[in-house]
Amino acid sequence: MAKKTPGESAPVAKPKPEPQAQVQAQPQPKPHRRQRKQGRVASDKMQKTIVVAVEELKRHRVYKRTYRYTTRFKAHDEYNEARIGDIVVIEETRPLSKEKRWKLVKILNRAVQTMAVEEVVAQLAPDLPENGEAETEDEE
């Protein structure tokens, strides 16, 4: 046993804190940050699906030349609101089909949509015959 010196006192026991109501929050797992990419809509011909072309600048390992690298992603467009040429933001999601693993988040910039030639002709000159039908006069 250790000897006590005259100036030494006995160790003091710290009072235990009273436990709060047993409602301690369980640690919530942090949600993984999903990857987001910005690109241009290359195709909107499928139902509820768009093809987004994402361009990146890469540098060649040996020759140090910078080149453009384009990757195409299929993304889910629930309301078919994106059109060809729009600049959009897509986000990773669970697999929705064989090739779709992205979803449309928002449309940043709308592309100027052009009208078909037939629509322009119909608006400017509605009295012209359609489908190349020539007006023929009956000769008697």
Image: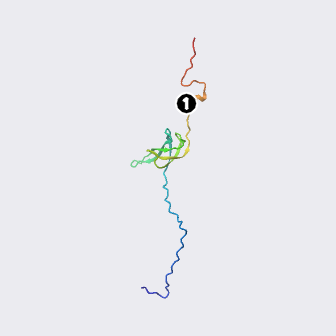
Which quarter of the rendered picture does the C terminus lie within? top right
Query: Which one is nearer the viewer's eye here, 21 or 85?
Result: 21
Q: Residues within 10 Å of mark 1 (few under 14, many from 20)?
A: few
Count of marks overlaid on the render: 1
Instruction: Residue 121: name its quadrant.
Output: top right
Please name the residue shown 55% across and 32% down the image.
Answer: 116
Q: Which residue is mark 1?
A: 117
Please name the residue shown 55% across and 30% down the image.
Answer: 117
Residue 21: where, in percent of width, then height?
55, 68
Query: Residue at the top extreme?
Result: 140
Horizontally, is 65 left or right of 140 in the view?
A: left
Query: Residue at the left extreme?
Result: 62
Picture layout, residue 130 above or below residue 56: above
Residue 8: where, in percent of width, then height?
49, 85
Which element type, helix, strand or loop, lies under badge 1? helix
Horizontally, is 137 left or right of 70 in the view?
A: right
Residue 5: where, in percent of width, then height?
47, 87
Amino acid type at mark 1: Val
| Color theme of the render | rainbow
Please name the residue shown 57% across and 30% down the image.
Answer: 119
Query: Which one is nearer the viewer's eye here, 93 or 33?
Result: 93
